[in-house]
Image (tube, rainbow, N blue to C red):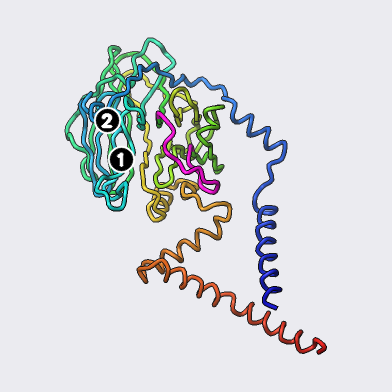
Amino acid sequence: MDSKNTIAAIALSSAVIVLYSLFFVPEKSTTDQSLVEKEKIEQGTDAPSLEQKETKIEISRDDALKQSERIQFENDNIIGSISLKGASIDDLTFKNYKIKVNDEEKVNLLKPRAIKDGYLIDSGFVTSDKNIDVPNSDTVWAIEGNNKLTNVSPIKLVWTNKQGLKFEKEISLDDKYLFSIKQKVINTTEKKFDFYSYGQIIRNEIPEIIDFLILHEGLIATLDDELIEEDYDDIQEKKFTKIANNGYLGFSDKYWVTTLIPPKNKEFKTTFDYKNKFRANFIATEPLELNANNSIEENLQIIVAAKRVDVIDSYAESLAIDKFDLVIDFGILYWLTKPLWFALDYFFKLLGNYGLAIIAVTVCIRLAVFPLANYSFRSMAKMNALTPE
Protein backbone atom coordinates (compact mmCIF):
# COMPACT_ATOMS: atom_id res chain seq x y z
CA MET A 1 0.00 0.00 0.00
CA ASP A 2 2.87 2.42 0.84
CA SER A 3 4.45 1.88 -2.58
CA LYS A 4 1.10 2.54 -4.24
CA ASN A 5 0.71 5.81 -2.29
CA THR A 6 4.23 6.86 -3.30
CA ILE A 7 3.53 6.17 -6.96
CA ALA A 8 0.23 8.02 -6.72
CA ALA A 9 1.94 11.03 -5.11
CA ILE A 10 4.59 11.13 -7.84
CA ALA A 11 1.93 10.85 -10.52
CA LEU A 12 -0.13 13.67 -9.00
CA SER A 13 2.94 15.93 -8.67
CA SER A 14 3.87 15.29 -12.30
CA ALA A 15 0.30 16.00 -13.36
CA VAL A 16 0.34 19.36 -11.52
CA ILE A 17 3.56 20.43 -13.28
CA VAL A 18 2.31 19.30 -16.69
CA LEU A 19 -1.09 20.96 -16.27
CA TYR A 20 0.55 24.20 -15.10
CA SER A 21 2.84 24.25 -18.12
CA LEU A 22 -0.15 23.61 -20.41
CA PHE A 23 -2.65 26.10 -18.98
CA PHE A 24 -0.62 28.82 -17.20
CA VAL A 25 2.58 29.16 -19.25
CA PRO A 26 1.71 30.48 -22.73
CA GLU A 27 3.00 28.29 -25.50
CA LYS A 28 5.48 29.99 -27.81
CA SER A 29 3.86 29.51 -31.16
CA THR A 30 5.51 30.22 -34.48
CA THR A 31 3.71 33.58 -34.57
CA ASP A 32 4.97 34.48 -31.10
CA GLN A 33 8.50 33.56 -32.08
CA SER A 34 8.32 35.78 -35.16
CA LEU A 35 7.02 38.64 -33.03
CA VAL A 36 9.89 38.20 -30.59
CA GLU A 37 12.38 38.22 -33.45
CA LYS A 38 10.71 41.32 -34.81
CA GLU A 39 10.97 43.05 -31.44
CA LYS A 40 14.67 42.22 -31.31
CA ILE A 41 15.20 44.17 -34.52
CA GLU A 42 15.91 47.79 -33.76
CA GLN A 43 12.80 49.87 -34.27
CA GLY A 44 13.37 53.12 -36.10
CA THR A 45 12.83 56.37 -34.23
CA ASP A 46 14.12 59.89 -34.59
CA ALA A 47 16.02 59.58 -31.30
CA PRO A 48 19.79 60.07 -31.68
CA SER A 49 22.30 57.32 -30.96
CA LEU A 50 24.02 56.93 -27.60
CA GLU A 51 27.24 55.81 -29.26
CA GLN A 52 30.42 57.49 -28.03
CA LYS A 53 33.98 56.64 -28.93
CA GLU A 54 36.04 55.81 -25.86
CA THR A 55 39.70 54.96 -25.44
CA LYS A 56 39.79 52.04 -23.03
CA ILE A 57 42.86 51.99 -20.78
CA GLU A 58 42.76 49.37 -18.04
CA ILE A 59 44.22 50.51 -14.73
CA SER A 60 43.75 49.55 -11.09
CA ARG A 61 40.59 50.50 -9.21
CA ASP A 62 42.49 52.79 -6.82
CA ASP A 63 44.18 54.59 -9.71
CA ALA A 64 40.87 54.93 -11.54
CA LEU A 65 39.23 56.51 -8.50
CA LYS A 66 42.05 59.08 -8.39
CA GLN A 67 41.64 60.11 -12.02
CA SER A 68 38.91 62.65 -11.29
CA GLU A 69 37.38 64.62 -8.44
CA ARG A 70 34.52 62.85 -6.70
CA ILE A 71 31.41 63.44 -4.66
CA GLN A 72 31.12 61.04 -1.76
CA PHE A 73 27.78 59.43 -0.86
CA GLU A 74 26.76 57.32 2.14
CA ASN A 75 23.79 56.06 4.10
CA ASP A 76 23.25 53.09 6.43
CA ASN A 77 23.45 50.55 3.60
CA ILE A 78 25.80 51.81 0.86
CA ILE A 79 28.90 53.94 0.51
CA GLY A 80 30.74 55.18 -2.55
CA SER A 81 31.32 58.12 -4.85
CA ILE A 82 30.16 59.84 -8.03
CA SER A 83 32.79 60.89 -10.56
CA LEU A 84 32.62 64.55 -11.55
CA LYS A 85 34.07 63.46 -14.88
CA GLY A 86 31.00 62.20 -16.69
CA ALA A 87 28.79 62.53 -13.58
CA SER A 88 28.58 58.73 -13.47
CA ILE A 89 27.79 56.59 -10.43
CA ASP A 90 30.77 54.23 -10.68
CA ASP A 91 31.81 53.40 -7.13
CA LEU A 92 29.40 51.63 -4.79
CA THR A 93 30.02 49.28 -1.87
CA PHE A 94 27.45 47.47 0.26
CA LYS A 95 28.22 48.24 3.91
CA ASN A 96 26.35 45.25 5.34
CA TYR A 97 27.51 42.46 3.01
CA LYS A 98 30.89 40.73 3.00
CA ILE A 99 32.57 38.87 0.15
CA LYS A 100 33.17 35.92 2.48
CA VAL A 101 31.62 35.02 5.82
CA ASN A 102 34.89 35.24 7.74
CA ASP A 103 36.27 38.17 5.75
CA GLU A 104 35.95 41.87 6.53
CA GLU A 105 36.11 42.95 2.88
CA LYS A 106 32.75 44.34 1.76
CA VAL A 107 31.05 43.69 -1.59
CA ASN A 108 32.01 46.36 -4.12
CA LEU A 109 29.52 46.32 -7.00
CA LEU A 110 29.90 49.45 -9.13
CA LYS A 111 33.39 50.25 -10.44
CA PRO A 112 34.99 52.93 -12.69
CA ARG A 113 34.82 52.42 -16.45
CA ALA A 114 38.63 52.45 -16.85
CA ILE A 115 39.17 49.15 -15.03
CA LYS A 116 38.72 45.67 -16.48
CA ASP A 117 35.48 44.89 -14.66
CA GLY A 118 34.08 48.41 -14.82
CA TYR A 119 30.38 48.72 -13.99
CA LEU A 120 28.66 52.11 -13.90
CA ILE A 121 25.51 54.16 -14.45
CA ASP A 122 25.06 57.46 -16.23
CA SER A 123 22.20 59.57 -17.56
CA GLY A 124 21.48 62.86 -19.25
CA PHE A 125 20.24 64.46 -22.45
CA VAL A 126 21.27 64.06 -26.09
CA THR A 127 20.22 65.90 -29.23
CA SER A 128 20.19 65.18 -32.93
CA ASP A 129 21.72 68.62 -33.59
CA LYS A 130 25.44 67.98 -34.10
CA ASN A 131 26.21 71.67 -33.47
CA ILE A 132 25.07 71.50 -29.86
CA ASP A 133 27.51 70.37 -27.17
CA VAL A 134 26.00 67.94 -24.67
CA PRO A 135 27.65 66.36 -21.61
CA ASN A 136 29.46 63.07 -22.22
CA SER A 137 31.82 60.74 -20.37
CA ASP A 138 34.67 63.30 -20.63
CA THR A 139 32.66 66.27 -19.37
CA VAL A 140 33.83 67.64 -16.01
CA TRP A 141 30.89 68.81 -13.92
CA ALA A 142 30.99 71.40 -11.13
CA ILE A 143 29.37 71.19 -7.70
CA GLU A 144 26.82 73.71 -6.47
CA GLY A 145 26.20 73.77 -2.73
CA ASN A 146 26.44 70.60 -0.67
CA ASN A 147 29.46 68.41 -1.45
CA LYS A 148 28.37 65.09 0.10
CA LEU A 149 25.31 63.05 -0.81
CA THR A 150 23.38 61.44 2.06
CA ASN A 151 19.78 60.45 2.67
CA VAL A 152 19.14 63.91 4.17
CA SER A 153 21.27 66.07 1.87
CA PRO A 154 21.00 65.95 -1.95
CA ILE A 155 23.64 67.34 -4.31
CA LYS A 156 23.57 69.43 -7.49
CA LEU A 157 25.97 69.11 -10.43
CA VAL A 158 26.11 71.74 -13.19
CA TRP A 159 27.78 72.23 -16.57
CA THR A 160 27.35 74.99 -19.17
CA ASN A 161 28.16 74.55 -22.86
CA LYS A 162 29.46 77.12 -25.37
CA GLN A 163 25.96 77.69 -26.77
CA GLY A 164 24.64 79.10 -23.48
CA LEU A 165 22.77 75.99 -22.30
CA LYS A 166 23.13 75.03 -18.64
CA PHE A 167 22.77 71.35 -17.68
CA GLU A 168 21.90 70.44 -14.09
CA LYS A 169 21.59 67.18 -12.16
CA GLU A 170 19.99 67.07 -8.73
CA ILE A 171 20.73 63.71 -7.13
CA SER A 172 19.10 62.47 -3.93
CA LEU A 173 19.54 59.22 -2.00
CA ASP A 174 17.11 57.44 0.32
CA ASP A 175 18.07 55.42 3.39
CA LYS A 176 18.48 52.17 1.43
CA TYR A 177 19.40 51.77 -2.26
CA LEU A 178 17.45 54.34 -4.30
CA PHE A 179 19.01 57.23 -6.23
CA SER A 180 16.57 59.80 -7.64
CA ILE A 181 17.86 62.07 -10.40
CA LYS A 182 16.19 65.26 -11.61
CA GLN A 183 18.04 66.35 -14.75
CA LYS A 184 17.42 69.77 -16.22
CA VAL A 185 18.44 71.96 -19.17
CA ILE A 186 18.17 75.75 -18.88
CA ASN A 187 18.13 77.82 -22.08
CA THR A 188 19.32 81.44 -21.72
CA THR A 189 19.30 82.08 -25.47
CA GLU A 190 16.65 83.12 -27.97
CA LYS A 191 16.94 79.82 -29.85
CA LYS A 192 14.84 76.68 -29.65
CA PHE A 193 16.24 73.17 -29.10
CA ASP A 194 15.09 69.55 -28.87
CA PHE A 195 16.51 67.10 -26.34
CA TYR A 196 16.01 63.39 -25.62
CA SER A 197 16.50 62.06 -22.09
CA TYR A 198 18.40 58.81 -21.58
CA GLY A 199 19.91 56.54 -18.96
CA GLN A 200 22.32 53.64 -19.31
CA ILE A 201 24.15 50.98 -17.33
CA ILE A 202 27.53 49.88 -18.67
CA ARG A 203 29.31 46.66 -17.73
CA ASN A 204 32.71 45.99 -19.26
CA GLU A 205 32.69 42.19 -18.96
CA ILE A 206 30.64 39.20 -17.90
CA PRO A 207 30.85 38.78 -14.11
CA GLU A 208 31.42 35.43 -12.45
CA ILE A 209 28.13 33.57 -12.76
CA ILE A 210 26.97 30.12 -11.65
CA ASP A 211 25.06 29.45 -14.92
CA PHE A 212 22.30 27.57 -13.10
CA LEU A 213 19.23 26.67 -15.16
CA ILE A 214 16.60 28.05 -12.78
CA LEU A 215 18.48 31.26 -11.91
CA HIS A 216 18.71 34.13 -14.39
CA GLU A 217 21.93 36.16 -14.34
CA GLY A 218 22.17 38.71 -17.11
CA LEU A 219 20.15 41.58 -18.55
CA ILE A 220 16.60 41.99 -17.32
CA ALA A 221 13.62 44.25 -17.95
CA THR A 222 9.89 44.49 -17.62
CA LEU A 223 8.48 46.56 -20.47
CA ASP A 224 4.75 47.20 -20.64
CA ASP A 225 3.98 44.23 -18.39
CA GLU A 226 6.28 41.82 -20.29
CA LEU A 227 9.20 40.22 -18.44
CA ILE A 228 12.38 40.04 -20.54
CA GLU A 229 15.45 38.04 -19.50
CA GLU A 230 18.47 38.00 -21.81
CA ASP A 231 21.69 36.06 -21.16
CA TYR A 232 25.07 37.67 -21.78
CA ASP A 233 25.94 35.31 -24.63
CA ASP A 234 22.60 36.04 -26.33
CA ILE A 235 23.33 39.78 -26.35
CA GLN A 236 26.85 39.16 -27.63
CA GLU A 237 25.27 37.46 -30.63
CA LYS A 238 22.37 39.83 -31.22
CA LYS A 239 21.16 43.01 -29.57
CA PHE A 240 17.67 43.40 -28.16
CA THR A 241 15.48 46.46 -28.72
CA LYS A 242 11.92 47.22 -27.69
CA ILE A 243 9.76 50.34 -27.40
CA ALA A 244 7.57 50.71 -24.30
CA ASN A 245 5.79 53.29 -22.12
CA ASN A 246 6.49 51.88 -18.65
CA GLY A 247 8.90 49.51 -16.98
CA TYR A 248 12.45 49.08 -15.75
CA LEU A 249 15.71 47.67 -17.13
CA GLY A 250 19.11 46.63 -15.88
CA PHE A 251 21.41 43.81 -14.83
CA SER A 252 20.54 40.94 -12.51
CA ASP A 253 23.21 39.07 -10.53
CA LYS A 254 22.75 36.20 -8.11
CA TYR A 255 22.57 38.45 -5.05
CA TRP A 256 22.41 41.99 -6.51
CA VAL A 257 20.38 43.99 -9.01
CA THR A 258 21.15 47.27 -10.81
CA THR A 259 18.17 48.91 -12.46
CA LEU A 260 17.02 52.08 -14.21
CA ILE A 261 13.40 53.23 -13.97
CA PRO A 262 12.61 55.60 -16.89
CA PRO A 263 10.02 58.41 -16.59
CA LYS A 264 6.54 56.91 -16.39
CA ASN A 265 3.97 57.03 -19.18
CA LYS A 266 6.46 58.39 -21.70
CA GLU A 267 7.48 56.28 -24.64
CA PHE A 268 11.10 55.15 -24.63
CA LYS A 269 13.28 52.69 -26.50
CA THR A 270 15.19 50.08 -24.50
CA THR A 271 18.33 48.51 -25.96
CA PHE A 272 20.54 45.68 -24.72
CA ASP A 273 23.73 45.43 -26.76
CA TYR A 274 27.40 44.48 -26.72
CA LYS A 275 30.21 46.42 -28.36
CA ASN A 276 33.32 45.61 -26.32
CA LYS A 277 31.08 46.15 -23.28
CA PHE A 278 27.53 45.32 -22.26
CA ARG A 279 24.98 48.14 -22.19
CA ALA A 280 21.42 48.33 -20.96
CA ASN A 281 19.97 51.71 -21.86
CA PHE A 282 16.83 53.64 -22.61
CA ILE A 283 16.23 56.81 -24.63
CA ALA A 284 13.04 58.80 -25.07
CA THR A 285 11.46 58.40 -28.50
CA GLU A 286 9.92 61.88 -28.45
CA PRO A 287 12.03 64.97 -27.76
CA LEU A 288 11.40 67.60 -25.12
CA GLU A 289 11.12 71.02 -26.74
CA LEU A 290 13.33 73.62 -25.08
CA ASN A 291 12.02 77.05 -26.00
CA ALA A 292 13.89 80.33 -25.78
CA ASN A 293 14.64 81.50 -22.21
CA ASN A 294 12.98 78.43 -20.79
CA SER A 295 13.91 75.08 -19.23
CA ILE A 296 13.04 71.38 -19.41
CA GLU A 297 13.47 68.63 -16.83
CA GLU A 298 13.10 64.88 -16.51
CA ASN A 299 13.11 62.51 -13.54
CA LEU A 300 14.37 58.96 -13.27
CA GLN A 301 15.24 56.51 -10.52
CA ILE A 302 18.17 54.14 -10.05
CA ILE A 303 18.06 51.15 -7.72
CA VAL A 304 21.29 49.32 -6.88
CA ALA A 305 20.21 46.81 -4.27
CA ALA A 306 20.75 43.52 -2.55
CA LYS A 307 18.08 41.01 -3.60
CA ARG A 308 16.15 41.08 -0.35
CA VAL A 309 12.47 40.35 -0.80
CA ASP A 310 11.32 43.02 1.67
CA VAL A 311 13.49 45.68 -0.01
CA ILE A 312 12.48 44.79 -3.57
CA ASP A 313 8.78 44.50 -2.70
CA SER A 314 8.81 47.85 -0.88
CA TYR A 315 10.28 49.63 -3.91
CA ALA A 316 7.84 47.86 -6.24
CA GLU A 317 4.97 49.20 -4.14
CA SER A 318 6.24 52.70 -3.27
CA LEU A 319 7.42 53.50 -6.82
CA ALA A 320 4.59 51.58 -8.52
CA ILE A 321 7.04 49.52 -10.60
CA ASP A 322 5.12 46.74 -12.28
CA LYS A 323 6.62 43.26 -11.77
CA PHE A 324 9.73 44.64 -10.09
CA ASP A 325 9.53 41.74 -7.63
CA LEU A 326 10.48 39.42 -10.52
CA VAL A 327 14.11 40.59 -10.33
CA ILE A 328 14.25 37.87 -7.65
CA ASP A 329 13.92 34.65 -9.63
CA PHE A 330 11.31 32.43 -7.97
CA GLY A 331 10.93 30.27 -11.10
CA ILE A 332 7.85 29.42 -13.16
CA LEU A 333 6.01 28.22 -10.03
CA TYR A 334 6.24 31.78 -8.65
CA TRP A 335 2.68 31.63 -7.29
CA LEU A 336 3.73 28.70 -5.09
CA THR A 337 7.41 29.31 -4.29
CA LYS A 338 7.07 32.91 -3.09
CA PRO A 339 4.37 32.17 -0.46
CA LEU A 340 6.48 29.22 0.73
CA TRP A 341 9.46 31.58 1.05
CA PHE A 342 7.39 33.98 3.17
CA ALA A 343 6.37 31.08 5.42
CA LEU A 344 9.99 29.91 5.79
CA ASP A 345 11.15 33.45 6.51
CA TYR A 346 8.45 33.95 9.15
CA PHE A 347 9.33 30.76 11.03
CA PHE A 348 13.06 31.42 10.69
CA LYS A 349 12.64 34.82 12.36
CA LEU A 350 10.42 33.20 15.00
CA LEU A 351 12.59 30.14 15.72
CA GLY A 352 16.03 31.33 14.64
CA ASN A 353 16.88 28.15 12.73
CA TYR A 354 16.12 27.15 9.14
CA GLY A 355 15.90 23.45 10.05
CA LEU A 356 13.15 24.18 12.56
CA ALA A 357 11.54 26.57 10.08
CA ILE A 358 11.33 23.80 7.44
CA ILE A 359 9.80 21.44 9.98
CA ALA A 360 7.28 24.10 11.00
CA VAL A 361 6.28 24.79 7.38
CA THR A 362 5.95 21.03 6.76
CA VAL A 363 3.66 20.71 9.78
CA CYS A 364 1.53 23.63 8.55
CA ILE A 365 1.19 22.07 5.10
CA ARG A 366 0.25 18.72 6.62
CA LEU A 367 -2.38 20.42 8.80
CA ALA A 368 -3.74 22.33 5.80
CA VAL A 369 -4.20 19.17 3.73
CA PHE A 370 -5.23 16.98 6.69
CA PRO A 371 -8.99 17.10 5.93
CA LEU A 372 -8.32 15.91 2.38
CA ALA A 373 -5.80 13.29 3.54
CA ASN A 374 -8.14 12.09 6.30
CA TYR A 375 -10.98 11.73 3.78
CA SER A 376 -8.63 9.77 1.53
CA PHE A 377 -7.58 7.50 4.41
CA ARG A 378 -11.21 6.80 5.33
CA SER A 379 -12.03 6.02 1.71
CA MET A 380 -9.09 3.62 1.52
CA ALA A 381 -10.20 1.98 4.78
CA LYS A 382 -13.67 1.41 3.36
CA MET A 383 -12.18 -0.03 0.17
CA ASN A 384 -10.01 -2.36 2.25
CA ALA A 385 -13.08 -3.53 4.14
CA LEU A 386 -14.73 -4.48 0.84
CA THR A 387 -11.66 -6.28 -0.45
CA PRO A 388 -12.18 -10.08 -0.32
CA GLU A 389 -9.71 -11.98 1.85
Which residue type does callout 1 highlight? Asn
Task: Relative to 322, say whether 352 is above or below.
Answer: below
Task: Relative to 252, say whether 354 is above or below.
Answer: below
Which residue is under mark 2?
Answer: 61
Q: Residue 209: say if magenta.
A: yes
Identify the magenta region. Answer: 204-219
x then y, percent, for residue 107? 31, 43
Mark 2 nearby-residue class (10 Å; few <14, some 14–19, many ≥20): some
Q: Residue 326: say if magenta.
A: no
Task: Relative to 219, say whether 9 is above or below.
Answer: below
| Disc 2 secondary structure class | helix
Which residue type does callout 2 highlight? Arg
x then y, percent, for residue 129? 42, 13
In-front residue for pair 9/152: 9
x then y, percent, for residue 374? 63, 82
Predominant secondary structure, magenta span: loop
| Disc 1 secondary structure class | strand
Residues at marks 1 and 2, CA–CA distance in whole angstroms: 11 Å
Name the residue rendered at 31%, 33% in the picture. Answer: 111
Q: Are the two marked residues, 1 and 2, in contact with CB atoms closer than 8 angstroms?
A: yes
Q: Is there any visible trace of residue 121 in the rendered image?
A: no
Which residue is under mark 1?
Answer: 108
x then y, percent, for residue 59? 29, 24
Residue 166: quarter of image: top left
